[in-house]
Amino acid sequence: MIAKVRGILDHKAPGEVIVDVGGVGYQLFTALSVFYRLPEVGEPVTLLVYTHVREDTLQLFGFFDPAEKQAFVLLTGVSGIGPRLALNILSGMAAGELLDALREGDVARLVSIPGVGKRLADRMIVELRDRINMLPEAAPEAAAVPGIRGDALSALVNLGYRRADAERAVRQVLGQGAAELETVLKEALRVLSL
């Protein structure tokens, strides 16, 4: 099983990357949160890998941090969620926030993710609640981002932006590494004005 890939970023597109490792190009499927944090093509990159094997295919899924990979593995354990849907879910919500929503049984937050309806959200909560409670809580630094996310979303919605548009803009800005509320708001407003 391939657990980590370190090499030169050869190609990047939303949803997939190719990493050149000693002349061999590894195609990895990624969430949008990973795509936004990637370096420029030609730069070195290291990704954690989940290897998915089926009788007719071998696919690699790449992640920057262990929490993303752990959330992905948990999601693929839910009946009806395959690797592609798990990536879609992680593209719609940061891993830490997703785990918090599952711990709290927050169906409303889960159905705000594209591709997740009420029945799937309920199934995720039921099937993952016990496993989620056994995981350690997020580190204080990681927990700060969801708070900033919530504050930024609230501010943008109060300014009159649609919640879905505000979530998309904030997710994009946070994916680029912004970590202060003022910066997130300023960049999100810029994204929304395009």
Image (cartoon, helix red, strand yellow):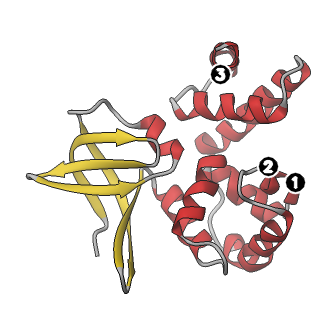
Picture coordinates of residue 78, whole percent (x, y): 66, 77
Read off the residue under disc 1. Answer: 108
Q: Pointer 2 and pointer 3: residues touching (CB < 8 Å)?
A: no
Mark 2 falls on what kind of element?
Answer: loop
Q: Quadrant of residue 154?
A: top right
Picture coordinates of residue 192, whole percent (x, y): 70, 19
In the image, what residue type sits under mark 1?
A: Ala
Q: Is residue 124 left or right of residue 178?
A: right
Q: Quadrant of residue 178?
A: top right
Read off the residue under disc 3. Answer: 184
CA separation, marks 3 and 1? 23 Å
In the image, what residue type sits under mark 2?
A: Ser
Mark 1 falls on what kind of element?
Answer: helix
Residue 22 higher or lower than 54, as above or below: above
CA separation, marks 2 and 3? 20 Å
Residue 166 higher or lower than 102, as above or below: above
In the image, what residue type sits under mark 3?
A: Val
Read off the residue under disc 2. Answer: 112
Residue 174 higher or lower than 128, as above or below: above
Marking on residue 152: none
Mark 3 against mark 1, which lies toward the viewer?
1
Q: Earlier in the sequence, mark 3 or mark 1?
A: 1
Picture coordinates of residue 82, whole percent (x, y): 56, 72
